[in-house]
Image (cartoon, helix red, strand yellow):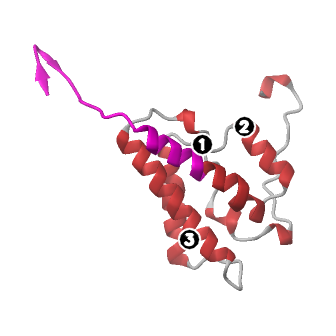
Amino acid sequence: MYKGGLLVKVVYSSTYEQEQRIENLVSYFFNFIFPTYFPEDEISHFKKIGVLKSEAYAGTLRRAYQIMTSLQVIITILEKNENSEQYSIDMKRELLLSKNIQLLNESGMFFPFLSNHFLQSTNENSSMVYEEPAHQFLN
C-alpha cells in the first residue's frame, strides 16, 4: 500500500484464540513430550532458559499459524515415534522434523533441539547435558 510518499505494509495481528492455542501446545510439550525424552531437571532448565517461550515472537497472524503448524507437526512425529517399537525416526520424518524445528526457530520461538535429541527416550538416559556457567561473564 502506498500512502503519501510512504510505503505502508499492513500486518495482521494474531488472535487471542491463536495465542491460547500456542500456549496449550507449549504446555503439552512440557507435560507430555519432553518427559519422554529428557529427565525432569533438564525440563525445568528448559523452562528457565526460555524454551518455547511464546512471548518471544512478534504476534503476527502469519507467525502464529507457522508456530501452531510447526508445533503440531513436531508433536505428531514424536508421538508416532513414541508409539513405535523402535526409537528411531525414518529419514523422511527426520527431515520433516528438522524442517519444522527450523521453521519454529525462524518464527521467533526458542527451540534449541535437533532431530537427534528425540531419537532416544529417557529410558536410555538421553540427555542434552546443560551446565550452569561457572563464571558470571557467561550469563
Left or right of residue 68, residue 117 in this image: right
- Image: 22 above or below 114: above
Q: Which residue is at 76% across, 65% downward?
A: 36
**Magenta segment includes 19:** yes
- The numbered dot on residue 110 is 1
Q: Which residue is at 78% across, 28% downward?
A: 138
Near-viewer residue (132 or 87): 87
- Image: 126 above or below 54: below
Left or right of residue 34, residue 126 in this image: right
Query: How many angstroms separate mark 1 from mark 2 (CA)?
Result: 9 Å
- Image: 88 above or below 105: below
For disc 3, the marked residue is: 94
Q: Secondary structure at mark 1?
A: loop
Q: Which residues are magenta?
A: 1-25
Query: How many angstroms separate mark 2 from mark 3 (CA)?
Result: 25 Å
Q: Earlier in the sequence, mark 1 or mark 3?
A: 3
Q: Earlier in the sequence, mark 2 or mark 3?
A: 2
> Is there a contact, CB below 8 Å, between mark 1 and mark 3?
no
